[in-house]
């Protein structure tokens, strides 16, 4: 009789276990800005199914927060490794709309991903792109 009751309540125990795991994960995410969650997420992302789910979730969150930046990132990802070659990167930036370009350049400036230009021509090109982005505001 007791074994029968345990078997009938098995879905409830599984559900309670999942809830406890979720609460523990949420608590760890709050401690030190998610310092203890990052290694767990890095391990989880190695699984292709979870990687796709995490990518979809982050893309959806970005689309809700900043739709222009999300569409700019999608366009830049479609062009592939255009960011490594300055000419291809410039061509990719020119394919963006003015709002997308502003959002993308603001995000890149915030991340600090633009390296210092190698020569005067590249510095001038970068400064011109920033001025054009500011004028369009």
Image: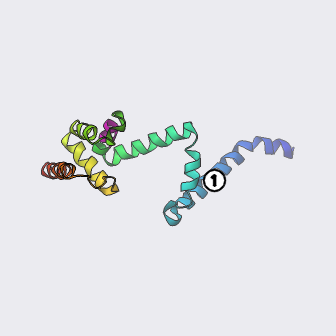
Task: Look at the image and say whether residue 112 sits in the magenta stretch.
Answer: no
Q: Is residue 18 left or right of residue 78?
A: right
Report the magenta residues as a range: 70-76
Q: Residue at x 58, y 40 (%)?
A: 47
Q: Is residue 75 magenta?
A: yes
**Which residue is more in the foreground, 91 or 105?**
91
| Drawn side of residue 52 relative to residue 92, left or right | right
Q: Residue furthest right?
A: 1
Which residue in the structure is indicated by mark 1? 21
Q: Nearer the viewer, residue 75 or 119?
A: 119
Q: What colour-coding does the image apply?
A: rainbow
Secondary structure mainly formed by the magenta segment: helix
The x and y percentages for residue 59 are 40, 42
Residue depicted at 33% across the width and 56% down the height: 112
Depicted 59 relative to depicted 36: above or below = above
Say which element carries label 1: helix
């Amino acid at each position: 009789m007791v074994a029968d009751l345990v078997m009938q309540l098995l879905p409830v125990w599984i559900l309670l276990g999942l809830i406890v795991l979720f609460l523990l994960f949420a608590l760890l995410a709050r401690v030190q800005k998610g310092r203890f969650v990052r290694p767990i997420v890095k391990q989880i992302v190695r699984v292709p199914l979870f990687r796709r789910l995490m990518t979809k979730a982050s893309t959806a969150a970005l689309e809700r927060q900043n739709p222009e930046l999300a569409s700019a990132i999608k366009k830049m990802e479609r062009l592939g490794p255009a960011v490594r070659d300055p000419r291809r990167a410039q061509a990719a930036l020119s394919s963006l709309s003015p709002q997308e370009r502003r959002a993308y350049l603001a995000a890149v400036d915030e991340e600090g991903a633009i390296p210092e230009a190698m020569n005067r021509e590249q510095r001038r090109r970068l400064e011109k792109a920033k001025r054009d982005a500011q004028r369009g505001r």
